[in-house]
Structures are given as C-alpha cells and as structure tokens.
Amino acid sequence: MRLECSWSEVFTSIVEPSIAKLALSRLFCYDGVMPRRWTHGEEGKMRKELNRLYTVENKTIREVGKILGIAEQTVFQRIQRLGIVSTPYLKKGYSAKRREDIIIPKSYSPDLAEFFGIMLGDGNLSFYQVIVTLGTKEYAYAEYIVRLMKGLFGVAPKIGIRKTGYKNVYVGSVALSHWLKDEGLVYNKVRAQVSVPEWIFEKSQYLERLVRGFFDTDGSVYRLRFGVQISFTNRSLPLLKGIHRACKFLDYHPSHISGFRFYITKRPEIIRFFQEIQPKNPKHGERFEWIMNELGR
C-alpha cells in the first residue's frame, strides 16, 4: 500500500504546522530546485545578516522573512545552508508538545547498536524527527526498520514515499531526537565527521549488529571477474574508520581505507559475513546468492 509523506502527519503533534511545513519542504526538496552557489561575499553578508536577526535578536523565521522581504521557506533554507543552528524552542510563543508514547531506552542493546548502524548509514537526525531514507526498491527493508524502531521506542514510525519513489521511515519526537544526539548521533554526519559511539565497542554482539545496520544502508556486494567483494562507503572518515575497526574486531581482514571506502575480498570471509552478520536488507542477500550461484559456489 502506498503511503504519501505529509508534513501534517509528521509534525502536527509536536510543532507549529507552519514551521513543520518549512522543515519538510527543505528536507524533501518538494520544489526540486537546487539553489545556485553564492559568491564568498554574498555568503558572508547573508550569514552576518541572519545571525543578527535570527540568533542575536532572536526573531522567528516569520519575522526575519518580513524584515528581509523574502518567503519564510527561503529564510529556513538559508539558515540550513549557512549552517546556522535552528533554535525554534528559544523563540517567543514556541509550543512544541512532548510526545508521551515514545520510550527512551534505559540501557544499550544489540537492537540499539543495529539502529545506530542504520542511522550512521542512511539516517538523518533533526531537532524534530528521526528519518531513514531508502531507495526506490527497499520497501521490505523499510518495513524491517519499522519493526526494529517500534521494539526500541514503543511506537511504529511511518513510511513515506516521495514522488521519486524513495522511501522515508520517520518518527517525530523532540525528546527522542535529543536523546539520540546525546548518545552520539549528529544533525549533519559529514560536516560533523561523526564517529561510532564507544559503547558499541564494549560487546562483540553490539559490533555485529552495528556492522549489519551500516552494511544494510551504506554497503554493497558485487561480483569480481573471479570472485566476490563487499564494500563499505561513507563520506565521514572517522565513521568509516570506526566501521573498519569493528570489522577487524570481528576477525575480518578489510582493505585499507581509500576514497571513502574499504573492502572485504576474501571469499571465505564474505561467506562467513553473510552467515554471522546476516544482513536484513533483502537486496544484499539476493545479490549475494545470485553471485555465488554464478561462481558455482
């Protein structure tokens, strides 16, 4: 069944609808238009102007828009583009509601480690919500993430389908977003150069599930001329080093990191990887089986 992404469904219970609409418009790029690159002078001028109005004078996005004579959506986009921290909770009249149905985990667990792997791969954290973005053919995996998150946080996230066919698994909760940030996730993984939280290295089971979640979202398996290979890719080098470290702890022999990726190429290790890590994204298992059949096992 096709479910459409609706900002009113996501944010109505936690934030002023006008702000929620702006946030989703920016996040999902409804208009599909990419802004042009600013000159160095333009960027400096805009950052100084927005910092003064939004941060120093603590005006709302609506007030800033009226002063500058631009749309609220444009103000929000510029704030995000310039890396200015969004602080709606500091504005006069802020009335976000705290969800009472969200469960915040009281201890670490293998399921939580897997969820962190997923978030470090294809997740996105904002002040208001937690989102995992998946490809056009990954609905079955989206349903798996829904079950995983429901078990962890007590509520089932929704699955939204963009016009492009990409899937978004999302749940809105300020409290959950803040807790995940306190536990090591960030709003912009590449800019912050996020790394793997140290608690995950406390147990091998945590590491296995971390690697599973990350591989399911940012990994791939493909055939070589005379063999098979799996790869892990991410633009945050500290994160990639953390996943590399986890693989070594689990007695795999990954290649050196090069070009924001590393590989595992030994066939016995790849077979063990699929037996022990047991990726849950069906596309990986199906492709692995196809490759092994082509190679004659």
Image (cartoon, grey):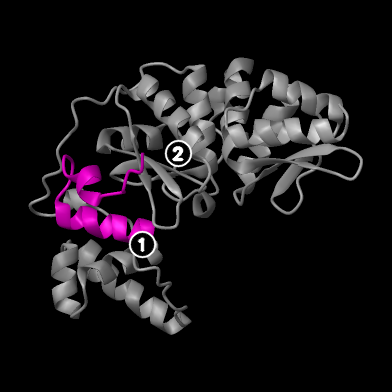
* Total marks placed: 2
- Name the amino acid type tagged 1: Gln
Q: Residues within 10 Å of mark 2 (few under 14, many from 20)?
A: many
Residue 25 highlighted magenta (yes or no): yes
Q: Residues within 10 Å of mark 1 (few under 14, many from 20)?
A: some
Identify whether 244 is placed above or below 133.
above
Marks 2 and 1, how far apart at CA: 18 Å
Q: Residue at x 38, y 19 (%)?
A: 151
* Horizontal and vertical percent position of residue 60: 16, 62
Q: Nearer the viewer, residue 135 or 246?
A: 135
Q: Residue furthest front?
A: 1
The residue that disc 2 covers is: 185
Q: Which residues are magenta?
A: 1-29
The residue that disc 1 covers is: 80
- Residue 75 seen from this side: yes
Q: Nearer the viewer, residue 57 or 24?
A: 24
